[in-house]
């Protein structure tokens, strides 16, 4: 089953205050294994980044002003996530911002099924810290590259956290296929000798 691990960075917390998306990152998983297919872009939010958001991700107004606008990438983005389940940490935040961007363009809201890893973690570890950093620490996932929040790094970490949250310590391998290939190799070796 194909799933998309998704994260966004924004100019601030609430769409009600007019905040917009500045970065989208997506990593495709196929049966919990990353496929190497990624979607990533920085966006010109057409507004100033709040001081708090700048502290979180470090994307300046100057840097963002030269990036594409959401309307320029929306079709590629929607095609990338089409018919795939989305894996998001605190999905309410990301989905509200994505739907706001779609609403501005007169497009339909995202209809994908969503797995919120924040909800999974809250149910699994009631009363414990369930931030992405806390979950990385709990599962001994190296998050040393995460000096600032960036969408692709966060997606990579979340993919690993998600596998642990659903009790799949490692992606599933089809051992029957592996054994068949090993048997074939042994036969070839026998004939060579």
Image (spheres, helix red, strand yellow):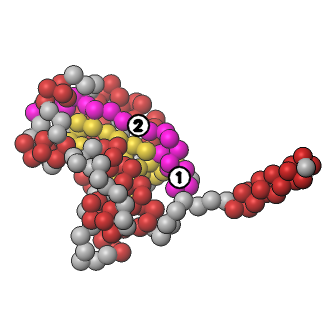
State whether residue 126 is above or below residue 61. Answer: below
Left or right: where 132 falls relative to 18: right
Residue named by callout 1 = 33
Q: Quadrant of residue 105?
A: top left
Using a 10 Å C-alpha cutoff, classify the residue at mark 2 as few (fewer than 14 neighbours), some (14 to 19) or many (20 or more): some
The outermost residue toward the top is: 66
Mark sitting earlier along the chain (2/1): 1
Left or right: where 191 falls relative to 80: right
Q: What residue is rendered at 83% in x and 55% in y? A: 186
Q: Nearer the viewer, residue 12 or 151?
A: 151
Q: Nearer the viewer, residue 114 or 67?
A: 67
Q: What residue is rendered at 25% in x and 74% in y? A: 128
Q: Position of residue 66 (x, y in %)?
A: 21, 22
Q: Position of residue 64 (x, y in %)?
A: 19, 29
State whether residue 60 is above or below residue 126. Answer: above
Q: Quadrant of residue 126?
A: bottom left
Magenta-highlighted stretch: main secondary structure? strand
Dot 1 lies on which element?
A: strand
Q: Give yes or no for residue 34 being in the magenta stretch.
A: yes
The outermost residue toward the front is: 193
In the rendered structure, which segment of residues is drawn in magenta? Answer: 28-48
Q: What residue is rendered at 37% in x and 67% in y? A: 139
- Answer whether residue 119 is visible to the viewer in this image: no
Of labels 2 and 1, the one closer to you: 1
Q: Return the mark for residue 39.
A: 2
């Amino acid at each position: 089953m194909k799933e998309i691990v998704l994260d966004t960075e924004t100019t601030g917390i609430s769409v009600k205050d007019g905040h917009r998306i500045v970065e989208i990152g997506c990593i495709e998983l196929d049966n919990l294994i990353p496929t190497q297919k990624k979607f990533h872009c920085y966006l010109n939010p057409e507004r100033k980044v709040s001081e708090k958001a700048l502290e979180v991700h470090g994307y300046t107004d100057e840097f963002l002003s030269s990036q594409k606008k959401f309307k320029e990438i929306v079709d590629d983005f929607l095609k990338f996530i089409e018919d795939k389940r989305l894996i998001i940490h605190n999905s309410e935040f990301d989905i509200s911002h994505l739907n706001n961007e779609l609403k501005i363009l007169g497009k339909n809201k995202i209809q994908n099924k969503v797995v919120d890893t924040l909800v999974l973690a809250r149910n699994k570890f009631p009363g414990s810290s369930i931030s992405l950093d806390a979950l990385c620490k709990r599962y001994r996932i190296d998050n040393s590259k995460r000096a600032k929040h960036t969408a692709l790094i966060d997606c990579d970490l979340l993919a690993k956290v998600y596998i642990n949250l659903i009790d799949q310590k490692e992606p599933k391998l089809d051992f029957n296929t592996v054994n068949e290939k090993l048997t074939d190799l042994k036969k070839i070796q026998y004939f060579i000798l």
